[in-house]
């Protein structure tokens, strides 16, 4: 499928696909809100479709910008930073629970 994603990206180009990504992200936002307010099989199915659309567009943008590796490095950094935040939150919660005793 990677070959096909690249083919689509090359055909439409960065300008078109960046606008498409904006549109798909807006549709995903709506789908998330609908699914949160009214969790139904139909809303869940639509949410999955919108996630797929955004994911496909993101893959194309990363390819067109030659940025897949840079994005992966940024993701690792963000994951590690968030895990540190969680660790700090848990330590703070444990301290607050201890103070209440």
Image (tube, helix red, strand yellow):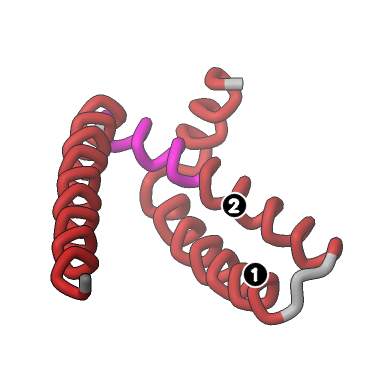
Front residue of 48 and 78: 78
| Identity of the residue furthest to the bottom in this view | 37
Q: For the N terminus, which image quadrant?
A: top right
Query: Is residue 61 found left or right of 35 in the rendered image?
Result: left
Front residue of 68 and 83: 83
Q: Residue at image x 70%, y 52%?
A: 49
Q: Which residue carries the number 1 mark?
A: 31
Q: Which residue carries the number 2 mark?
A: 51
Front residue of 1 and 43: 43
Quarter location, residue 71: top left
| Identity of the residue furthest to the right in this view | 41
**The residue tagged with tag 1: helix, strand or loop?**
helix
**The residue tagged with tag 2: helix, strand or loop?**
helix
Q: Earlier in the sequence, mark 2 or mark 1?
A: 1
Residue 70 vertical position relative to residue 19 in the rendered view, above or below: above
Range of the magenta residues?
57-66
Residue 62 vertical position relative to residue 22 in the rendered view, above or below: above
Query: Is residue 95 found left or right of 63 in the rendered image?
Result: left
Query: Is residue 61 found left or right of 2 in the rendered image?
Result: left
Residue 88: x and y in percent read 14, 54
Residue 91: x and y in percent read 16, 54
Residue 3: x and y in percent read 55, 18
Assign the magenta stretch its main secondary structure: helix
Quarter location, residue 92: bottom left
Asked if disc 2 and disc 1 are in contact, CB closer than 8 Å, the reply is yes
Q: Residue at image x 45%, y 64%?
A: 22
Residue 17: x and y in percent read 46, 50
């Amino acid at each position: 499928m990677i070959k096909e994603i690249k083919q689509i990206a090359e055909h439409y180009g960065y300008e078109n696909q960046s606008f498409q990504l904006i549109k798909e992200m807006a549709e995903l936002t709506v789908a998330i809100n609908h699914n949160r307010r009214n969790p139904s099989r139909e809303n869940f199915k639509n949410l999955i479709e919108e996630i797929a659309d955004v994911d496909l567009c993101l893959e194309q943008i990363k390819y067109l910008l030659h940025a897949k590796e840079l994005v992966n490095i940024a993701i690792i950094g963000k994951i590690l930073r968030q895990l540190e935040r969680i660790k700090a939150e848990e330590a703070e919660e444990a301290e607050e629970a201890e103070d209440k005793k």
